[in-house]
Amino acid sequence: MPDTNSSMSPTITAMIRLDHMHVLAAFHRYHTDTPWWRKRAIVNSVSAALEIHALLEEEIFYPALAGVMSEDKTLEKSQPEHDEMRATIAKLRASGPEDAAYDGLFQQLMREVMHHVADEETVLLPAAERALKGQLRSLGSKMTRRRMQLLGERPREIAVNTAGTFPIATFLLGSLLVIGATQCLPKSRRSRYAD
């Protein structure tokens, strides 16, 4: 009997690509003339996303891939690239938007991530789709469960920084949730909110 959760889960490679798109979209929101509070929110949001993403890859994706491509050069350099990104994140956290080096450090992080993403998107993900074809959904399910655990460790921090990074999207989503919630109320209670 097939695992229903796995059969409904996105593939691990699709999830990794979505993570890449999320971080790259956040990068594009950062400009030297961005207000300091938004710079901090973007950096914190990107940092948390990268830390979670790297941990998920190291715990789930890389071991699965190493089992079928043990001596791949791109896979071998992935962990050291994660360590490099973590070191840059630590420097960003030790400084702040008022620091003259902050913008340069964030640009350095962008370069490191873009290089890493290019390697994964062009080499590792296509290789995984060929070599792990039958396991991609179950690995995606495993990654989803682990991601929920990691997100649950710091929900407020992630929510606040995401709102600062993507304020319009956060407002629209919040508005839709409020509208949806009011539609779920009994008609008698709904009329109180309409007045």
Image (cartoon, helix red, strand yellow):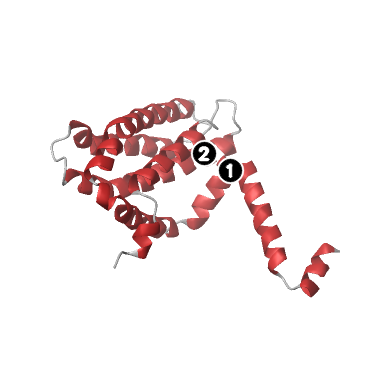
Nearest the viewer among 173 and 42 is 173
- The residue where tag 1 is placed is 164
Q: Which mark is residue 42?
A: 2
Furthest toward the front, the residue is 1
The part of the image, by quadrant, that contains residue 31 is top right
Q: Helix, strand, or loop for circle 2?
A: helix
Furthest toward the right, the residue is 195
Question: N-terminal of the two: label 2 or label 1?
Answer: 2
Are circles 2 and 1 on residues that touch, CB within 8 Å?
Answer: yes
Left or right: residue 44 versus residue 86 is: right
Q: Give, as a three-letter code, the residue at label 1.
A: Gly
Position of residue 49 measured from the top left corner of the image (x, y, whole percent): 42, 44
Q: Is residue 61 visible?
A: yes
Q: Helix, strand, or loop for circle 1?
A: helix
The residue at the point 39 percent across, 51 percent down is: 10
Assign the N terminus to one quadrant of the image. Answer: bottom left
